[in-house]
Image (tube, grey):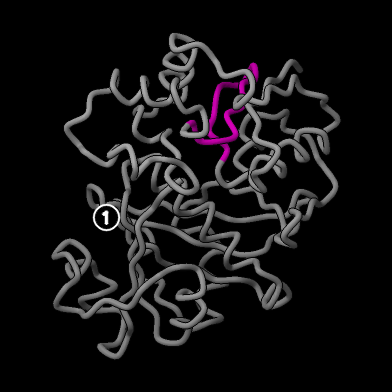
Amino acid sequence: MDIVIYHNPGCGTSRNALALIRHAGIEPHVIDYQKCPPSRELLRQLIERMGMAVRDVLRVKGTPYAELGLGNPALTDDELLDAMMAHPILINRPIVVSPRGVGLCRPSDMVLDLLPEAPLADFVKDDGEICLRDDEVAGRDAGLVAALAAESLPTSDLAEPGRRFFVYRTLSGEIVGYAGHELYEADAFLRSLVVLPAWRGKGAGKAIVSRLVRRAFDEGGRTAWLMTTSAAEAFEAMGFKRIARENAPEAILGTRQARELCPSSAVILSRAIRL
């Protein structure tokens, strides 16, 4: 398989994506885009093939994004592309091109969507986080229902419309956990997140949340919300902040989880979804 990766060797996510490609037995064409950036037209084509907006591909952290005023929503795509051409570090990374498509692989295991669907040995990222695959499952999936019931988490609304659920597995196929989301325009309500007992304390929850919010981002979600009675500190360690119930959007407060299924003592947390 012929694969190209627009790579930043100083970026951990980019290094992990490259290592995953090689873990799959493929030696890609590696382009250090800071030294050899794509042309303006090629970058535009890559963004279009990813199905993303130009702004979605802008890198904020560690770049002159703020200095250049690129947060201004009035800027056109052409103006944003001008900035990316002048400052290639503004191009988020890694962008991977394969016969299966083009993707901005954040988190790094999103690159699996672009690789052959073949069994692989398990893979641990350079920060110690396990690499996971996700597959969509129905709300009535027996494994999902059993995992939630074992933790006394709500199951009565799983089959209602507007919900998506995923099972998360290691590359060798072992189930690590489940999670889902409901999308209300730009607000993504994360729910039904459970890590199986054997995988607790190993960073699996963080890995699941990373993949789940990326799936929500690709559907238009830009702010993630969740409710919990027992794991607020764990989610705060992932960048979530506690929100007073009266400050949460009506769409989130109107979910069955918020109205009926979660106790009033449940903490509401939120964080922006950024790539």
Quadrant of res 262: bottom left
Q: Local crowd at mark 1 within 10 Å, few (<14), some, or many (≥20)?
A: many
Q: At 27% across and 39% down in the image, what residue appears? A: 69
Q: Position of residue 130 (x, y in %)?
A: 72, 58
Rendered position, 262 above or below 111: below
SS of the residue under disc 1: strand
Residue 171 at what x, y percent from top left? 76, 49
Relative side of 247 to 150, left or right = left
Vertical arrangement, residue 172 with respect to residue 82, above or below: below
Q: Left or right: where does residue 220 sit relative to residue 177? A: left
* Quadrant of the rendering where the N terminus is positioned: top right
Task: Report the side of 19 relative to 114 (left or right).
Answer: right
Pinpoint residue 135: horizontal percent, then vertical percent.
58, 46
Where residue 132 appears, as percent x and y from the top left, is 67, 52
Nearer to me, 162 or 25:
25
Q: Quadrant of residue 15?
A: top right
Residue at 60 percent of width and 60 percent of height: 207
Does the magenta-highlighted stretch encompass residue 98?
Answer: yes
Please provide the residue range marked out in magenta. Answer: 91-105
Find disc 1 in the rendering and name its residue: 187
Q: Residue furthest front?
A: 67
Residue sitting at 19 percent across and 70 percent down?
248
On whether residue 15 falls in the magenta region, the answer is no
Relative horizontal placement of residue 191, taking residue 11 as reference (left or right): left
Residue that appears at 38% across and 26% down: 83
Observer-nearest of 91 and 105:
91
Residue type at tag 1: Asp
Please identify the residue farthest to the bottom as the structure is shown: 265
Vertical arrangement, residue 149 with respect to residue 67, above or below: below
Pick the front one: 58 or 95: 58
When the figure is inspected, residue 224 is found, relative to residue 152, above or below; the finding is above
